[in-house]
Image: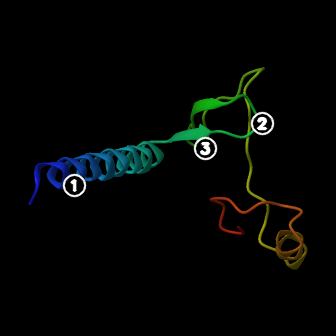
Amino acid sequence: MRPVRRRRYRGMQLALGAGGAVLLGIALAGAEGLRVNTTASMPRGIWRVAAAGTRIARGDIVSVCLPDSPAVREAGLRGYIPTGVCPAG
């Protein structure tokens, strides 16, 4: 292989490895209760999700799962409610 091709191949390997490491880090952070918010719905950044039953204080942001019902499923199909990690979507 010529030196130029070798350098390109090496650069591609490094880029793919770095991308894989970032994706793995995000997946592991999600398993540990960390969430990355990139939308304008809440302040952007990394959020820690506490377990159910944790004491709630003024100023905390609370997320709940809607019950799995025909109305909730229909709202999801129509795009009124985004999909998420809850059992109902």
Residue 52, disc: 3
Asked if the residue at tag 2 contacts the one at tag 3, i.e. Cβ–Cβ closer than 8 Å, the answer is no
Closer-to-camera residue (75/52): 75
Task: Residue at 82% x, 69% y: name it.
Answer: 76
Q: Amino acid at mark 2?
A: Ala
Disc on the earlier residue, 1 or 3: 1
Q: Amino acid at mark 1?
A: Tyr
Disc on the earlier residue, 1 or 2: 1
Q: Quadrant of residue 69?
A: bottom right
Q: Which image quadrant: the C terminus? A: bottom right
Real-space Cα separation, disc 3 to disc 2, in angstroms? 25 Å
The nearer-to-camera label among 1 and 2 is: 1
Q: In the image, 60: left or right of 26? A: right
Q: In the image, 78: left or right of 22? A: right
Disc on the earlier residue, 3 or 2: 2
Residue farthest to the top, as pictured: 58
The relative height of residue 41 versus residue 83 in the rendered view (above or below) is above
Residue 40, disc: 2
- Where is residue 80 drawn, in percent x and y? 89, 62
The nearer-to-camera label among 3 and 2 is: 2
Which secondary structure, mark 3? loop
Give the residue number, with chain letter if any, for mark 1. Answer: 9
- Where is residue 72 drawn, in percent x and y? 85, 70
Task: Residue at 86% x, 79% y: name it.
Answer: 70
Q: Quadrant of residue 77?
A: bottom right
Q: Amino acid at mark 3?
A: Ala
Residue 50, disc: none
Closer-to-camera residue (21/64): 21
Q: In the image, 37: left or right of 72? A: left
Task: Residue at 56% x, 37% y: name it.
Answer: 50
